[in-house]
Amino acid sequence: LFYSFFKTLVGKDVVVELKNDLSICGTLQSVDQYLNINLNDISVTDPNKYPHMMSMKNCFIRGSVVRYVQLPADECDTVELQNAARKEAMQSKSVAAAASAAAAGGGGGGGTGGHGGAH
């Protein structure tokens, strides 16, 4: 869900807040299925705190260190995003219910429950 959504934002300006409180502004260049992010033309929101970041123009951000991604307000259709999230949740529930029913219905086998007959 989020991967396909973020792919629609390629070329847009975003702010990525990391778990270490660093916020990086930039143009979204690419995103992968792990939500790793490539940004171009970056700047930091607090250059006095992170002066070493001022010399960087592009960066790769590992998805697991991202806390938030701030999106342009005009690019985020919240109704569509909510509907997609509901649809994905319903699909997950139906898959889980089918797996649960298959497990409860007996996975085949039957028999003595041991290792077979006498030796």
Image (cartoon, rainbow, N blue to C red):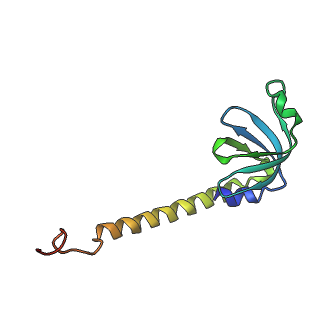
Q: Position of residue 52 (x, y in %)?
A: 83, 30
Q: Residue furthest front?
A: 119
Location of residue 19 by image quarter = top right
Nearer to me, 96 or 117 = 117
Nearer to me, 78 or 14 = 14
**Please, is residue 6 above or below residue 99 in the view?**
above
Q: Position of residue 84 (x, y in %)?
A: 62, 61
Q: Position of residue 18 (x, y in %)?
A: 69, 38
Q: Position of residue 119 (x, y in %)?
A: 12, 74
**Please, is residue 56 above or below residue 89 in the view?**
above
Q: Residue furthest left?
A: 118
Compared across the picture, whether 93 is left or right of 21 comes to left
Compared across the picture, whether 85 is left or right of 78 comes to left
Compared across the picture, whether 82 is left or right of 61 comes to left
Q: Residue at x 35, y 70 (%)?
A: 102
The N terminus appears in which quarter of the rendering? bottom right
Compared across the picture, whether 93 is left or right of 72 comes to left
**Please, is residue 90 above or below residue 118 in the view?**
above
Location of residue 32 by image quarter = bottom right
Q: Residue at x 79, y 25 (%)?
A: 49
Total marks placed: 0
**Please, is residue 25 above or below residue 84 in the view?**
above
Q: Residue at x 78, y 53 (%)?
A: 75
Q: Residue at x 72, y 38 (%)?
A: 17
